Image (cartoon, rainbow, N blue to C red):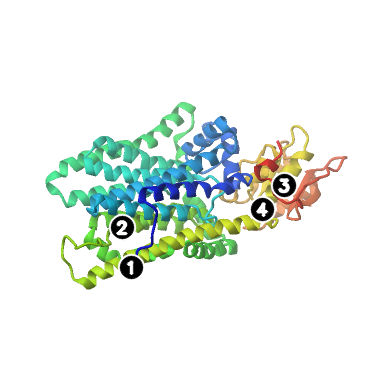
Amino acid sequence: MSRIPLPSPRLTVWIAAVAALLARYPSAMWPLRPDEAGFLLVARTWAPRADSVYGPYFVDRPPEIIALVRLADGVGGPYALRVLAALGILGFVLLAAATARSLATDAGRLSRERADRVAAWTAVVAAGLVGNAGVDVVSAKGEHLGIPLVMGACWLALAALRRSSASLSLLAGLTAMLAVGLKQSMVGGLVFGGVLLVGTALGDRPRVRSYARLAAAAAIGALVPVVAPVVWALVAGVDLGTLWYTVVGFRPDADAVLDAQPSSSIDARAVKMVGLAIGTGMLVLVAWFVLHLVPLARRLPVHTAAVSAMLLVDAVAVAQSGSFWMTYLVVLVPPVAMATALLLVAEPDQGPPADPEPPPRRAHRWTVGAITRGIVVFTALSSVSSLIIWWGLTEAGHRPVEYYAGEAIGDAARPGDTLVVYGGRADIQWASGLRSPYPHLWSLPMRTLDPDLSELSDLLTGPAAPTWFVEFTYLDTWSETGTQRISDELIERYQYVTTVCGQYRVYHLKSLERPVLESRCSAPWRGGLASLRD
């Protein structure tokens, strides 16, 4: 069995990185997705006060991600964040290769040529996984923005140990925690660096003071992204309890709501996620890594422990997410890429081994490497086919009906009109150009913070009632609690206008003149972002 041929390893790394960048082309073809639109609306109306981190709207994300969205929007408009995410993906692939090369030289003691080959294959698997359209190559979310930081933190941690550098260790801690500021569950960089440092220290007791110095530096670096929002909150007048609940405390309450309101759609997404993890090759690589965990731990104990811990923590975070959106799989790409690197590092050289071992064991290790490379090729082919399928679906008439619906409402609206989208579709809200007097742009915060819909009921009956009301989903989708009141108020104060795009019921405050919605829902989406109206 011969090796699967590649161009020169360093050229392969750049080809993989550029391919991952080009795989983001769907992001230049589709309007803002719900999370992107919601983050943008929050960023554009950001007005902190004592009882609210962001002012008019609530979102359970750290200030760092909203600040980044606001900065990108200010520099290049609503789609600048996608450009930033695409460049970050390119950087992620390059960092994955650099980290794999570091693993190969530091842990595996491989030659430069072998290390370059490991880096090349790792770049290919990183690009294949992150560039799969089934996972998400359209939107720019915290996961996409955070994985370059996670991988960068891993590379810095390895470099800090190799050079015994406190400054690099500080940067590793800082970078790892910055990723958490973009998505709270992205703790993989912290886990990898912590296990790597502790494991190395345990195996090198005479230098324990040196490792303690590195640990202190990493801790200081990690504290910076924690302290900065606290200082900002004190300056902006935001109560620290409000900041804590927004970033940390909301999640347990939301999980309780998800547990109390089981949903068939969530169960279906969970099954789809498992199928997608298999179809991309991600779960196959994880299973292959776990199958060889014992021999890897014998050969590379510290690095295997660090990658295993990172993979386990990230997998648990995805499994406990409760909602199982496909984008969550992006979080697993860094540890899966590093697990692949370890499998390749453990493969023997083609020449005579430095440490003689029985031929059957050596042949087995070579077979493991060959199969690993075969799985990597599968991930790349899966990525290419997914992009072809995505393009075919779009050309076949797949349309952004949420954008069309919001656009139609915006065209019919008058100055000063407001809109509430029940069920949380911020992309409809954004496309309409109308402000929402209701603070919940997502369904889960609505279900968690307004469980009996009393806040929404008071709004509909009060002086600030929205001009427009859209049922993105049925009122009783999650619970019947409070929905009868909402239904009665819609009947009393609102008139039914139409079911826009054949999907979403639209209501308008009763008036002498019944508004008319003219949508282009039947028009194919062929012009990409050029089809957007100003």
Secondary structure under the numbered disc 3 in the rendered image? helix
Looking at the image, residue 160 sits to the left or right of residue 132; the answer is left
Q: Which mark is residue 404?
A: 3
**N-terminal of the two: label 4 or label 3?**
3
Looking at the image, residue 87 sits to the left or right of residue 32; the answer is left
Q: Is residue 318 visible?
A: yes
| Residue bearing the label numbered 1 | 291
| Residue bearing the label numbered 4 | 482
Q: Residue furthest right?
A: 512
Q: What distance separates the C-alpha of mark 1 from that of mark 2?
A: 13 Å
**N-terminal of the two: label 4 or label 1?**
1
Q: Which mark is residue 342?
A: 2
For discs 4 and 1, the disc positioned in front in the rendered view? 1
Percent position (x, y) of residue 60?
51, 44
Residue at horizontal 17%, vertical 40%?
210
Q: Type of residue at label 1? A: Leu
Q: Type of residue at label 2? A: Leu
Residue at horizontal 37%, vertical 51%?
8
**N-terminal of the two: label 4 or label 2?**
2
Contact (CB < 8 A) between labels 4 and 2?
no
**N-terminal of the two: label 1 or label 3?**
1
Contact (CB < 8 A) between labels 4 and 1?
no
In the foreground, 413 or 122: 122
